Image: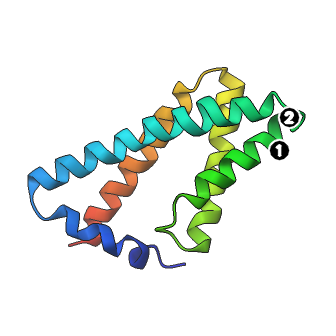
Amino acid sequence: YDSRQEMAPFRGLLGDPVSRVGFLFAVLLAGLTEELVFRGVLSRTLERTRLGFWAGAAVASGTFAVIHLQYGIGGQIVVFAIGMTLAWMRARSNSVWPAVICHAANNGLAYLALIAVSK
């Protein structure tokens, strides 16, 4: 699994300080919006059906992984596992906010790693 190759398209977004701030904002905003959609709405809605929590979380996490097409299959498996973990966090806390914070932190760390491998 070569994460550097998967991150290559994003390196061009780090050319100047304004681009870096904009990209970081987008990365953190993605954590908020994706969690509200996938864990806050989709997963909660599905778990109230006959699917129950785990199957509903798996459908929502699978959809979450599929929209991350920029990653290869290995990356999508990781994204699916992260989605399941975030769904569990949301259910355990009965709040989407711990998942939002963890998602944003994950994206922020990925952003820092992208800067590190771009040098």
Q: Is residue 98 left or right of residue 50?
A: left
Q: At 10% across and 50% down in the image, what residue appears?
A: 18
Where residue 59 appears, x then y in whole percent? Answer: 74, 48
Question: Residue 22 bears which disc, if any?
Answer: none
Q: At 62% across and 40% down in the image, what residue appears?
A: 86
- In which quarter of the view is residue 89 placed? top right
Where residue 25 appears, x then y in whole percent? Answer: 27, 42
- Image quarter (top left, top right, bottom left or bottom right) of the C terminus: bottom left
Q: Is residue 18 left or right of residue 119?
A: left
- Crowding at label 2, few (<14), some or many (≥20) Cα neighbours within 10 Å? some
Where residue 116 appears, x then y in whole percent? Answer: 27, 65
Q: At 37% across and 70% down in the image, what residue appears?
A: 7
Describe the element under mark 1 as helix, strand or loop. helix
**Above/below status of 112 relative to 72:** above
Q: At 59% across and 51% down in the image, what residue appears?
A: 64
Describe the element under mark 2 as helix, strand or loop. helix
**Above/below status of 109 relative to 103:** below
**Amino acid at dot 2:** Gly
- Crowding at label 1, few (<14), some or many (≥20) Cα neighbours within 10 Å? some
- In which quarter of the view is residue 10 placed? bottom left
Which residue has dot 2 on it? 52
Disc 2 + disc 1, Cβ < 8 Å: yes
Which residue has dot 1 on it? 55
Return the residue nearer the eye: 44 or 92. Answer: 44
Question: Number of callouts in the render?
Answer: 2
Q: Is residue 113 left or right of residue 21?
A: right
**Above/below status of 43 relative to 62:** above
- Image quarter (top left, top right, bottom left or bottom right) of the N terminus: bottom right
Q: In this view, does 14 lie to the left or right of 100?
A: left
Where residue 47 appears, x then y in whole percent? Answer: 79, 32
Q: Distance between the residues labelled 2 and 1?
A: 6 Å
Q: How is the image coloured?
A: rainbow
